[in-house]
Amino acid sequence: MLISILSTLTKLLNSFSNMESIFIPIGQKFLALALMITIANAMYQFWIKGDIQEMIASGIRMAMVTAIPLFMLTNGQWATQMNKVDQFFVTGLVASVAPDASSGSTTPEQVVGKMLTNLMNSADIKDNGGTANLQSKIDANNAIIANLNLNSFSNPKQSADNQASVDALTKANTNLEGQITSSGGSPTGFWHTLGAAIDPATYYSLFLHIAVWTLTVLLAAAVIFAVYMPLASIKIGIIMGPLLLAWLPWEGLSDMSKKWISFMIANGMTYVVA
């Protein structure tokens, strides 16, 4: 079931790839608007202060800064370059730290699947049946005692041997009843009937399995969240990137572009660490 969940999440992330260029036309318009605002501001500053050196410096800065979004948002470069960024974090860096990188298992589904498999194996409890059903042993011994008594009645010659066996089984039953009593049960009444049907050790085994598997499910959810959340953030960042990177030339909103770059790097490193 976990592998099916991972496959579904991976398909969902892959579907984001079809949307990575959806905002490029709007991003190009934003870039043109940012350039117009920057040029108008430079001309206004020159008109107010008359400082041609500052205008030239602003023009050089604008040309250098504009080259980045202009290159990314034209000629289909966005999809190509963002795919390289995605692969750098998802495959390139992970291949250096993933234990099975040499075998090529560095896709998100493979990495998380390996982590969850190790987690499930480490949480697996081998059920050896616990303690035996003490009451069922007593009932079995009682059945043997009844057969021995019947055999003694029909074969008096074997009466002495049968009596020795009966005495041994009776002593064994006494010990078993003592174990039931010491464990909080009772050899008679309601608890006797309940103990004959269900081994009290079953409760402990069931509780232990529920506790361990509940913890395992929570840890598995944490692993999936830790790995797939940064990946989803990277994909969403790629989709929204053209709208934010376009404002890099204008100092008034250039912080949005810088924060977008920081966002992409932070989520990429988070995925590598996870």
Image: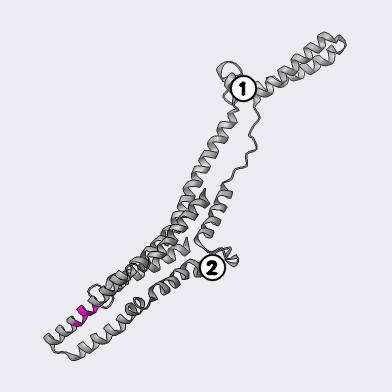
Q: Nearer the viewer, residue 39 or 220?
A: 39
Q: Secondary structure at mark 2?
A: helix
Examine the rendered structure and indicate whether residue 152 appears above or below residue 177: above
Examine the rendered structure and indicate whether residue 201 appears above or below residue 157: below
Q: Residue furthest bottom?
A: 52
Going from N to C along the chain, the mark reached first, 2 or 1, is 2
Identify residue type, mark 1: Ala
- Using the rendered image of the protein, determine whether residue 234 is visible from the camera's viewpoint: no
Q: Which mark is residue 196?
A: 1
Identify residue type, mark 2: Ala
Describe residue 145's horizontal placement relative to residue 224 as left or right: right
Structural crowding at the residue carrying mark 1, measured as other residues with C-alpha within 10 Å and reported as few (<14), some (14–19) or many (≥20)? some
> Residue shown at 62%/39% (left/top)?
127
Q: Secondary structure at mark 1?
A: helix
Label 2 or label 1, whichever lies nearer to me, is 2
Q: Residue furthest right?
A: 157
Examine the rendered structure and indicate whether residue 190 appears above or below residue 250: above
Callouts 2 and 1 close, C-beta under 8 Å:
no
Instruction: Report the residue marked by disc 2.
Output: 95
Q: Nearer the viewer, residue 183 or 81?
A: 81
Describe residue 106's horizontal placement relative to residue 51 as left or right: right
Residue 75 belongs to the span the image colors magenta? no
Region of the chain picked out in magenta, as a range? 34-39
> Residue shown at 79%/18% (left/top)?
165
> Residue shown at 31%/84% (left/top)?
64
Q: Position of residue 5 (x, y in %)?
A: 48, 51
